[in-house]
Amino acid sequence: QVQLVESGGGLVQAGDSLRLSCAASGRTFSNYAMGWFRPAPGKEREFVAAISWSGGSTYYADSVKGRVTISRGSAKNTVYLQMNSLKPEDTAVYCCAADPRTSAVVAGKGIVYWGQGTQVTVSS
């Protein structure tokens, strides 16, 4: 059974940092791109960041660029999201996603696997 399990969320103050983790299991994810999404007004979800299967390419939404870093663990089945200088508007449930196609993860369409999410709350 394939599972993506997120962790690391919490309640922080504006300007603080958090590191989210997503642990994938149930199959080999070394050839899967992975990414992070969060809900957005008027949308089902908003793309936050993505990383290719090799870790050699990363992609970021303009809203988080410069404040967020996505990375993969050495075993390729874990992805991290380091979030710095958090703002109240970053408050959301952050969900992890995985798909063989990097383009699908960046576009947020047709993604094969999703996690349940971890809550991030940023107080002002």
Image (cartoon, grey):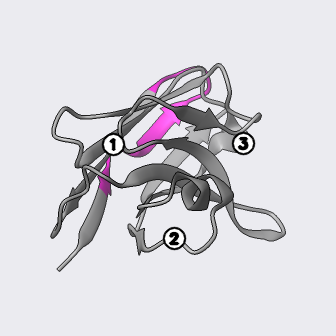
Segment tinted magenta in the rendering: 6-17
Which sits earlier in the primary sequence, circle 2 or circle 1?
1
Name the residue carrying label 1: 79
User: At which x and y percent is residue 48?
Assistant: 62, 45
Amino acid type, label 2: Ile
Judge the density around disc 1: few (<14), some (14-19), many (≥20) Cα neighbours within 10 Å. many
Would residue 113 be found to the left or right of residue 63 on screen?
left
Determine the residue located farthest toward the bottom in the rendered image: 1
User: At which x and y percent is residue 60?
Assistant: 64, 36
User: At which x and y percent is residue 63?
Assistant: 75, 35
Identify the mark at residue 111; answer none if there is no mark.
2
Q: Are marks 2 and 1 in contact (CB under 8 Å)?
A: no
Judge the density around disc 3: few (<14), some (14-19), many (≥20) Cα neighbours within 10 Å. few
Name the residue carrying label 3: 89
Q: Are marks 3 and 2 in contact (CB under 8 Å)?
A: no
C-alpha span from label 2 to label 1: 16 Å
Q: Is residue 13 magenta?
A: yes
**Which of the two residues, 68 or 99, is positioned nearer the viewer here?**
99
